[in-house]
Amino acid sequence: MLTPEAGKDYPRNWSEFLDWFATDDKCLAYLEHLRWPTGFVCPSCSSVAEPYRAIRSRLVCRDCRHQSTVTAGTIFDKTRTPLRVWLAAAWYVTNQKHGVSALGLQRVLGFGSYETAWMMLHRFRRAMVRGGREPLKGLVEIDETYLAITDHQNPISPVGRKSNTSKVLVAIAVEILEPKWFGRIRLRRINDDSERCVVPFIQEVIEPGARIRSDGSAAYRSFEAIGYKHHRTVVKGAEIAAHVSLPGVHRVASLLKRWILGTHHGAIQPEQLDHYLDEYVFRFNRRKSGSRGMLFYRLLEQAMVTEPVTYSNVVKRPRPRVKNG
């Protein structure tokens, strides 16, 4: 797969962005190339013939007469917001190193409704997880951390409590690039720190045979039996502090909490937490990217293969996910 080129596959700066996406027709043409880089493929019969282009941006398959659009079946499906606004939002989201809140996006793009900006961000978050990602490899640190979350749907009684927040447990895996650098990360909300919850996370995000470094938790006892090289460091009562023996996971946990409080002011609901974690992984793993335009390209590329997201999909309270970034 060829690496996208700045100025050819994506804008290099805001000035070029305005030239490239001045109209919705230009936006449609760009998204069509992202969705079908080698030419149109009928969603119904898989025909690769050039479609008949009807009114209202309809693409009609010449073989089966199926009608579709560039945005059908993607996060842009049935949107009433102009595509040039969507792409401007994608550019702004990826060009803000630490992310953006819904209120910030509303102010920048001039939305009359906060909910419009809020839903737009949640749709983009669904597109920040790429299917088939390579698992972590080499030396990987693992641990868990607690995040303080306020549940406005089922608030905790203030009686006998200093705050109305509850704690959610999040598993962390961090590639360690020796001697002291960090590589990619993975995060997942888990019910508890038992072996039953931790082992499936490890098996999904870390390749077999990798070296795992952890504390002395009993949840990690079976790692060698399932094919990993495991080094346990008991930190409780040890002379060396936990953040020294396991620097990667402690650094990521600290940055994650700071990001939630700083960018989102702690206003994250439990039912949406998984997707905020996905966004943080997306941003952390691309923190060294020299081109923000490349992040814009990758986000839109993934958006074109991500299923539609409705308001009810976002606000419903899901069961704990089996799969998470």
Image: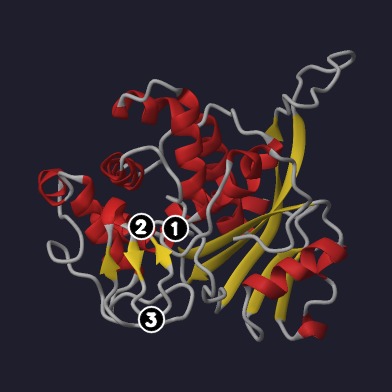
Residue at x-position 26% and y-position 43%: 84
Q: Earlier in the sequence, mark 1 or mark 2?
A: 1
Amino acid tagged 2: Leu
Q: Quadrant of the N terminus?
A: bottom left
* Along the viewing direction, whichever of 128 and 288 lies nearer the viewer: 128
| Front disc: 1 or 2 | 1
Please indicate, yes or no, whether residue 291 appears anywhere in the rendered image. no
Coordinates of residue 180 in the picture (x, y in percent): 46, 64
Spot occupied by residue 271 in the image (x, y as percentages of width and height): 70, 40
Tell me which numbered mark, 3 or 2, is placed earlier along the sequence. 3
Which quadrant holds residue 41? bottom left
Label 1 sits on what residue type?
A: Ala
Amino acid type shown at disc 3: Asp
In this rendering, the count of numbered labels is: 3
Judge depth for marks 3 and 2 and give the one in front: 3
Q: Position of residue 129 (x, y in %)?
A: 52, 61
Distance of label 3 from label 2 (alpha carbons): 29 Å
Q: Secondary structure at mark 3?
A: loop
How far apart marks 1 and 3 lie (CA) works out to 19 Å
Q: Are marks 3 and 2 in contact (CB under 8 Å)?
A: no
Q: Is residue 231 above or below residue 180?
A: below
- Between 198 and 109, the residue placed more toward the observer is 109
First in sequence: mark 1 vs mark 3 = 3
Mark seen at residue 300: 2
User: What residue is drawn where x is 71% and y is 82%?
Assistant: 228
How far apart marks 1 and 2 lie (CA) works out to: 14 Å
Q: Which residue is mark 1?
A: 72
* Residue occupying image coordinates x 89% and y 15%: 160
Secondary element at tag 2: helix
Report the mark closest to the observer, 1 or 3. Answer: 3
Q: Residue at x 55, y 53 (%)?
A: 278
Q: Which residue is mark 3?
A: 63
